[in-house]
Amino acid sequence: MLIVLAPGPEPASRTPLVVGIVNNMPPSAVRATERQFCGLLAAASKRFIVGVQFFSITRPGAAEPDDGGPGAYGDWRQLERAGLDGLVVTGAPPPGGDLRDAPEWPRFATLIDMARERRIPTIWSCLAAHAAALHLDGIQRRALPRKLSAVVACNRTETYDPVMTGLPGSWRAPHSRYNELPEESLIAGGYDILSRSREAGADIFAKECGVPFLFFQGHPEYEACTLLREYRRDIGEFLTGLRRSYPDMPLNYFDPASIAALDRFRERVLTAPHPDLLKDFPFGTCEQGLRAPWREIAVGIWSNWITSLHLRRVSQGRRTERLPDPVMTGPRLRVALPHVRAC
């Protein structure tokens, strides 16, 4: 199913750009991930009509529940025939050990090769970036001493790339991961570091692989409350015995009142841990003080990326069908409303 994101009042082109999203998240996070990426694409595509089609490696050909979400996922092997202008590959829950030992690895490696051979400009997000760098150049990720969960200060480098056009010299961005790609290994492998962070290392980087590939170790698509939801999930794993230690609080994220409430909750849990305590997690108190200072930067980067897809199509002289005016809805085409509640 193709989801068409409503453009601004005067789109630069009435021909839709088709972006595929390979959503690798588990069922519990599928809808949130769809909302995050569709919301970001919608905000960034004011000058263009963008159609989104979802694919899955872990759920090939399986339709998602009919709960108001985008609908059926396409099998990832259909990517070759989907006529995509661009591709986004999401992260996934981090497996332990070597990524190549994961059961999905052969499919993921084939997907990377397919994107390169079919010349599809691709964004690789978080764990997908780690997997792509490993398959393309043998760059091994390394484990961090503890999970990185924070909103970190990032600085733009002097390296030129069209996706960085108009961006300021610094901004803040959310990161959430257990591993990292060492910057020195990326540079040795021919990757261009576009932004970096003292706390988080390489933030955004790129490589020309016959087609432009863009990599994010952070999560510019995150909503204001995403790190809060992840923190609550990690505490739940501690309470049910899935993790040994109480998780660290996300850094540079909460206001003083929220930190105090979370400290009190932590003390209560460590005094008498029980799974039922999770229902008392102060989500509402913490959510009130949350903001997403990275949103404007994220929209700028993705807007530049969408513009690059349009320019690439024009330069290649590709023939495409024009969307009916007004946009039609039907069994294979419907309009996505980006005005869903963020958190």
Image (cartoon, rainbow, N blue to C red):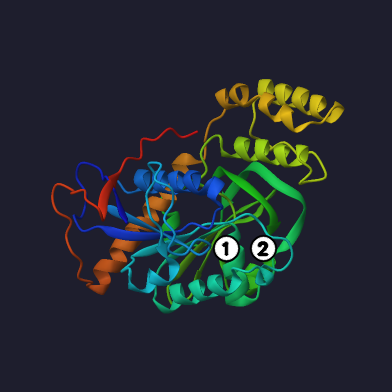
Q: Secondary structure at mark 2?
A: loop
Q: Quadrant of residue 74?
A: bottom left
State the residue position of label 1.
129
Please provide percent x and percent y for residue 177: 66, 51
| Residue at (52, 43) in percent of width and height | 222
Residue 47 seen in this snapshot: no
| Residue at (26, 71) in percent of width and height | 315
Q: Secondary structure at mark 1?
A: helix
Q: State if disc 2 and disc 1 touch (CB < 8 Å).
A: yes
Please provide percent x and percent y for residue 318: 23, 72
In the picture, measured across the screen, residue 199 lies left or right of residue 293, that is right
Crowd tier of the residue under label 2, counting other residues whose Cα lies within 10 Å: few below 14, some 14–19, many 20 or above:
many
Residue type marked 2? Leu
Please provide percent x and percent y for residue 65: 43, 48
Report the residue that reaches farthest toward the right.
Answer: 271
Crowd tier of the residue under label 1, counting other residues whose Cα lies within 10 Å: few below 14, some 14–19, many 20 or above:
many
- Residue nearest the viewer, comparing 46 with 16: 16
Q: Quadrant of residue 247?
A: top right
| Residue at (25, 43) in percent of width and height | 8
In the picture, measured across the screen, residue 57 lies left or right of residue 186, that is left
| Residue at (68, 67) in percent of width and height | 184
Residue type marked 1? Ala
Q: Quadrant of the N terminus?
A: bottom left
Please provide percent x and percent y for residue 26: 56, 52
State the residue position of label 2.
181
